Image (spheres, rainbow, N blue to C red):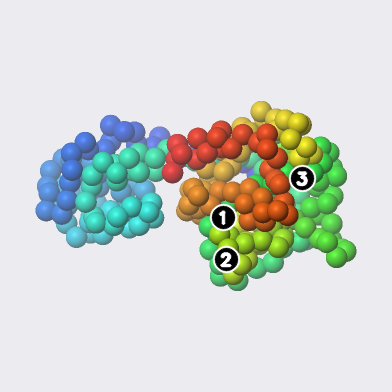
């Protein structure tokens, strides 16, 4: 019997843009604007000390840690770029509800960090066929993915994020083959025949608009590493098909990263 998991709502609302100072702040600054910045850093779990309004070494270190995570210059100075990133960090992201349909086809990541999200089409318009293919436990051509998005919007999870699924095949990331794309990626399959004329559904896009930002934020995946199978296996793969609306997915990611 498949199990269903759903996202947990936060216990309180996240701070808004009014929580963040407008002015530049750096080590040595004091006052209520510093305290507002510290409160946000505490909320985001970068600062463990209390918000005392004193921009000392601990606040600078917390800000530098945030800047590194968000691929900013880690100078410890609060300015427009850091403020913009903090605003995005305050936008909550939640994993959509998933239906668990475990696949036996996976392996350890062997210590490799997740830094790629890879989108595919299945080559079929039948969810049951896709589930059977991704869960086939024997034979020489076993495959899997972490997620399958059905045309009606059901999101199936087949492999836990902590494990490597078998979805990329012979592939490379910007010419690099080690670690393998499978070891470093999350694979998302979309039920679609890949003809380029069969539309991806509104329900599928709505799931992707939540799932991809959630995964990108959770695993700190660079936006440029949110790719299609064709990008890591050019000439061999064409998915997702040409009629896939990449701009829609990228807008959703841009709102939180």
Give the residue at the far top of this rendering: 202
Q: Is residue 139 left or right of residue 22?
A: right
Q: Is residue 216 above or below residue 19?
A: below
Residue 132 spot, x, y in % from top left: 84, 50
Quickly name the residue at label 2: 176
Q: Which mark is residue 122?
A: 3
Q: Is residue 110 left or right of residue 59?
A: right
Cα separation, mark 2 vs mark 3, equals 25 Å
10 Å neighbourhood of mark 3: few (<14), some, or many (≥20)?
many
* N-term-proximal mark, 2 vs 3: 3
Who is closer to the viewer here, 120 or 29?
120
Q: Are marks 2 and 3 in contact (CB under 8 Å)?
A: no
Residue 129 spot, x, y in % from top left: 85, 44
10 Å neighbourhood of mark 2: few (<14), some, or many (≥20)?
few
Residue 237 spot, x, y in % from top left: 72, 51
Image quadrant assignment for residue 60: bottom left
Q: Is residue 103 left or right of residue 247?
A: right
* N-term-proximal mark, 2 vs 1: 1
Could you say whether the residue bearing mark 2 is in a helix, strand or loop? loop
Q: Residue at x 63, y 56 (%)?
A: 232
Residue 231 spot, x, y in % from top left: 62, 51
Cα separation, mark 1 vs mark 3, equals 19 Å
Cα separation, mark 2 vs mark 1, equals 13 Å
Q: Which mark is residue 256?
A: none
Q: Is residue 26 visible?
A: yes
Quickly name the residue at label 1: 116
Q: Is residue 44 left or right of residue 144?
A: left
């Amino acid at each position: 019997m498949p199990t269903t998991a759903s996202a947990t709502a936060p216990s309180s609302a996240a701070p808004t843009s009014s929580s963040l100072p407008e002015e530049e702040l750096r080590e040595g600054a004091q006052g209520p604007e510093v305290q507002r910045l510290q409160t946000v850093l505490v909320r985001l779990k970068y600062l463990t000390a209390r918000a005392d309004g004193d921009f000392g070494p601990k606040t600078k270190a917390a800000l530098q840690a945030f800047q590194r995570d968000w691929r900013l210059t880690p100078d410890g100075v609060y300015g427009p770029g850091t403020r913009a990133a903090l605003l995005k960090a305050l936008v909550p992201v939640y994993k959509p509800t998933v239906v668990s349909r475990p696949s036996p086809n996976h392996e350890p990541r062997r210590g490799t960090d997740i830094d790629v999200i890879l989108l595919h089409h299945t080559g079929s318009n039948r969810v049951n066929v896709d589930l059977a293919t991704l869960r086939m436990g024997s034979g020489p051509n076993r495959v899997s993915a972490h997620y399958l998005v059905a045309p009606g919007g059901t999101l199936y999870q087949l492999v836990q994020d902590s494990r490597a699924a078998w979805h990329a095949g012979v592939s490379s990331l910007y010419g690099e083959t080690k670690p393998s794309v499978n070891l470093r990626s999350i694979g998302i399959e979309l039920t679609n025949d890949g003809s380029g004329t069969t539309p991806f559904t509104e329900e599928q896009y709505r799931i992707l608009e939540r799932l991809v930002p959630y995964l990108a934020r959770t695993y700190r995946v660079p936006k440029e590493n949110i790719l299609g199978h064709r990008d890591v296996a050019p000439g061999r793969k064409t998915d997702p098909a040409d009629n896939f609306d990449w701009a829609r997915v990228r807008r959703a990611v841009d709102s939180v990263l």
